Image (spheres, grey):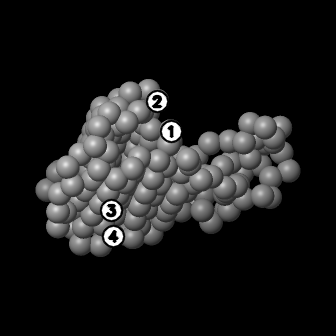
């Protein structure tokens, strides 16, 4: 089950941002840098893209790979481990922390959404969670990952799946909403 929490509890109305001025400035500057310095780079300039992500607060270890067309909303809420991959046109709407562990792949046009609202409150405050994509997991093309979900080690999420709940390690899920299809054989992940 997803674990969500209030982004900030300083909202008097639904029209007050839960982001600090500093966070808003960092996000806007990043979006300008993404358009001018990130998106236009050739595939082989991955070290430059990783440098830009780190410059804006992303935590990286080893050598992750990020395609030029991959979008990250807030780099300071992102962690990428060794050989993690953000595929072409993937989008991380990371209003809360997102961790893509070693050797995990987020394939093309995957949408990782880490924010929703508490619709039981008239103010509709922002709820965020922590999304973790486990070591060696694979998220298929155009899948949608909901806020606060954990994808287990070695799990496989089918193309176009909508993941609303945690996925157990070494499990294959698919569909809308994503349901368990079968187990995968466990393998050694470097």
From the image, tell me which residue sits under label 3. Answer: 101
**Residue pictured at 39% horizontal, 50% vertical:** 168
Q: Earlier in the sequence, mark 1 or mark 2?
A: 1
Label number found at residue 132: none
The quarter of the rendered structure image containing the C terminus is: bottom left
Q: Residues within 10 Å of mark 3 (few under 14, many from 20)?
A: many
Tell me where residue 16 appears, x and y as whole percent. 77, 49
Front label number (1 vs 3): 1
Element type at mark 2: loop
Total residue callouts = 4
Mark pair 2, 4: CA separation = 31 Å
**Residue at the limit of the structure toward the right, as seen here:** 12
Element type at mark 4: strand
Label number found at residue 60: 4
Do the CB atoms of the residues marked 2 and 4 lie less than 8 Å apart? Answer: no
Mark pair 2, 3: CA separation = 24 Å
Tell me where residue 152 appears, x and y as whole percent. 37, 54
Mark pair 4, 1: CA separation = 27 Å
């Amino acid at each position: 089950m997803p674990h969500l929490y209030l982004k900030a509890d300083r909202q008097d109305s639904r029209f007050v941002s839960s982001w600090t001025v500093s966070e808003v400035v960092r996000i806007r500057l990043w979006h300008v840098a993404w358009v001018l310095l990130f998106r236009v780079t050739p595939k082989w300039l991955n070290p430059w893209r990783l440098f830009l992500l780190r410059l804006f607060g992303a935590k990286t270890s080893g050598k992750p790979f990020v395609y030029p067309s991959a979008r990250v909303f807030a780099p300071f809420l992102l962690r990428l481990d060794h050989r993690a991959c953000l595929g072409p046109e993937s989008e991380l709407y990371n209003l809360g922390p997102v961790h893509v562990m070693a050797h995990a792949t987020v394939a093309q046009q995957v949408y990782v959404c880490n924010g929703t609202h508490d619709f039981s409150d008239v103010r509709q405050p922002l709820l965020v969670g922590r999304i973790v994509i486990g070591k060696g997991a694979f998220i298929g093309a155009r899948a949608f990952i909901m806020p606060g979900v954990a994808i287990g080690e070695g799990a496989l999420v089918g193309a176009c799946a909508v993941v609303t709940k945690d996925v157990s390690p070494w499990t294959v899920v698919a569909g809308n909403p994503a349901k368990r299809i079968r187990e995968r054989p466990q393998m050694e992940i470097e």
